[in-house]
Amino acid sequence: MRIVIASGKGGTGKTTVATGLARSCEGDVQLLDCDVEEPDCHLFLKPNIEGSEAVGIPIPTVDGEKCTGHGECGKICQYNAIVSLGGAPVVFPELCHGCGGCALVCPEEAITEVPRQVGVVEYGHSGHIEFIQGRLRVGEAMSPPVMRAVKKYVREGATTIIDAPPGTSCPVVEAVKHTDFAVLVTEPTPFGLNDLTLAVEMLRKLRIPLGVVINRAGIGDDGVEAYCRSEGISILLRIPYDRRIAVAYSRGETLEVAIPEYREKLAGLATAIAAKVSS
Amino acid sequence: MNELVVVSGKGGTGKTTLVAAFAALAEKTVLADCDVDAADLHLLLEPRIRRREPFKSGHTAFIRQADCTQCGVCDTHCRVDAIRIDRDPDGNPTFSVDSISCEGCGVCVHFCPEGAIDFPESTCGEWFVSETRQGPMVHARLGIAEENSGKLVTLVRNEAKRIVHDRHFELLIADGPPGIGCPVIASITGASLVLLVTEPTLSGLHDLERGFELADQLGVPTAVCVNQHDINPSMTETIDRECEQRSIPVVGHIRHSRDVVHAMVAKQSVVEYTESPVAEEIRKVWHQVNAMLQAGAETRA
Amino acid sequence: MKVAVTSTGKTLDSPVDPRFGRAKNFIVFDTETGAHEVLDNRSGVDAAHGAGPQAAQEISRSGAKCVITGRCGPKAERALQAAGIEVIPGATGTVAEMLEKFRRGELSSSAESSDPNGS
């Protein structure tokens, strides 16, 4: 069962729910941190990192001896990552998406592809949880390849919890694709509601079943509750606003360590999701 | 012209809350909401939309079924698994492009032996020019699952700059996107000052360091503001020390206060909503930031 | 010799566009004949990525051997260098003023004065 924890905006408590849920699930559990721009789950789970692997995308190198300056490479490239200026083309690795078009199209076979590192995947354990995280290199713009590399670690049969980046853009879709259920974490405020509706729209477009967790319940207004009622979205859990939680978070403690009664509530959340997925 | 961009490593640190307050305190300012993935500034400023434009960027492949011979060349070349193959009960395949996965590289279009793949420009969202009670605002909405917000961020910034110029204003305040990727790079490159908003949490500290690295790489002057500093005073001290070591000014500490959410519910900025201590702290941050902007402008001149 | 100047407008008295990759227009001036042509840089302005390399490609096609602009990003600079095109950054004023200074030999290319953070 693959559960993705997502949210329309950042700072709603996605990581709190993801790590708390992983800790409260028994048996074979994996946690995949796909928020590769800001991977934070490790701060709470403090895993033993046992190994890592570089993530690269293939970029072209041009053999100047073979190149005859046709310029076909520059024409096919949609990203201006290879441009032909009369002589041998110039490659801009940071713009390359690694589609391979230039190498395929070159009539002289002057282009070969070599990997360029854009990030890293680290793996290890935190107690009974198998932990995997991706980390995008600072200044890199291409997170989907790193997320795809993290998601290769998904094992059939395990309970896999995926922490997605916030928002509804392309990288978020990469994280939520091929999951069985999405938990949307939100706050009961006008910002929270606005971003929740966008996230719901995205998940419906992708046909992924979803439920909502309201974090800091009681701080704002009842707009989120009313929206969920009218849209027929189930509210899986309400985590009341509690200064103890904010303080625990700031120290890097997981929810169920800070407030033990949450262990049961989070375990209940896992059971409720499992029931929804199997029905 | 001065351009202030307010960013944070992670979301939810109070970026938009500060931008809305600055907008109320500053004079002759144009606002740009560059957080196009989760644009929230409009909720506080209630813009009246004056101009609305589609945002087009990149291309998406589209297979014309009438001309497709199901040869599978497109699927062989596609590296993002965007070619969907559906089979009818007899096992006959239909090829189509999953427009959400397609990155618009055009390789399938080029190599389709039948020329059966179209490559139209894709509409990825909309952008708007609006009037608000705090002045003009440029904002945008990116479609679901669309990529490329870096280009849209650039467009929003440029349009806002044009308005600053046309109206002879002197300041542009931008609400930046969270993270360190393409949209952030697009929003802070060439800015006069970047204000990093953080919280005194382990994640806040961790993300702040990544933010410093990026601002440093791009050569943009940076200042830091610690929001909800009283959640964890010792972490606040750690952040202050870290900033001191890097010679990055800390322009203020803002306390945790429920007034922030109450103002949001009332669709107002904190400084409009209340005179309480939290509003006073935000005012102080603004005066510091404004002084840095003025000093920077003098140095440049 | 042909010289390209980044321009906000389509005439010689237009202000110089300080950007290279996303400049509105390029005015390509032939110093031997005194003729000029205007290249609309829409493809650069509209480029999702790599406006600099895209624009460098346009300049290379126009046959210009020198570019006068405000600032030029690192990618554009690399592309122009590879194409053997000289870059003169730091331009201000109008296109005609810059061309006049160029004719009198008052402009010089200086790689170090271009902005390393330009886009």
Image (cartoon, coloured by chain):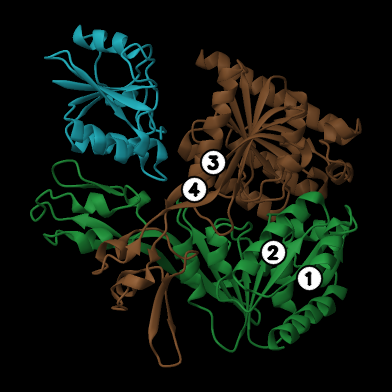
Chain colours: A green, B brown, C cyan
Q: Residues within 10 Å of mark 3 (few under 14, many from 20)?
A: many
Foreground mark, 4 or 2?
Answer: 2
Rendering coords of residue B52 (x, y %): 60, 38
| Secondary structure type for disc 3 | helix
Q: Amino acid at mark 1?
A: Ile
Do the CB atoms of the residues marked 4 and 3 lie less than 8 Å apart?
no
Rendering coords of residue C12 (x, y %): 31, 13
- Labels 4 and 2 positioned on one and the same chain: no
- Labels 3 and 1 positioned on one and the same chain: no
Indicate whether A104 appears above or below A76.
below
Do the CB atoms of the residues marked 1 and 2 lie less than 8 Å apart?
yes
Query: In which quadrant will I find the C terminus of chain A?
Result: bottom right
Of the pair B16 and A248, the residue shown nearer to us: B16
Indicate whether B281 appears above or below A46.
above
Say which chain tag 2 marks: A
Indicate whether A115 appears above or below B25.
below
Of the pair A275 and A253, the residue shown nearer to us: A275
Do the CB atoms of the residues marked 2 and 3 lie less than 8 Å apart?
no
Q: Amino acid at mark 2?
A: Val
Q: Amino acid at mark 4?
A: Cys
Q: In which quadrant of the rendered view does residue B284 lie?
A: top right
Q: Which residue is mark 1?
A: A233
The mark found on residue B183 in the picture is: none
Q: Which residue is mark 4?
A: B182
Indicate whether A234 appears above or below B44.
below
Inter-mark Cα distance, 3 to 1: 32 Å
Q: Is residue A57 rendered to the left or right of residue B200?
A: left
Q: Residue at the location (67% across, 51% down)? A: B11
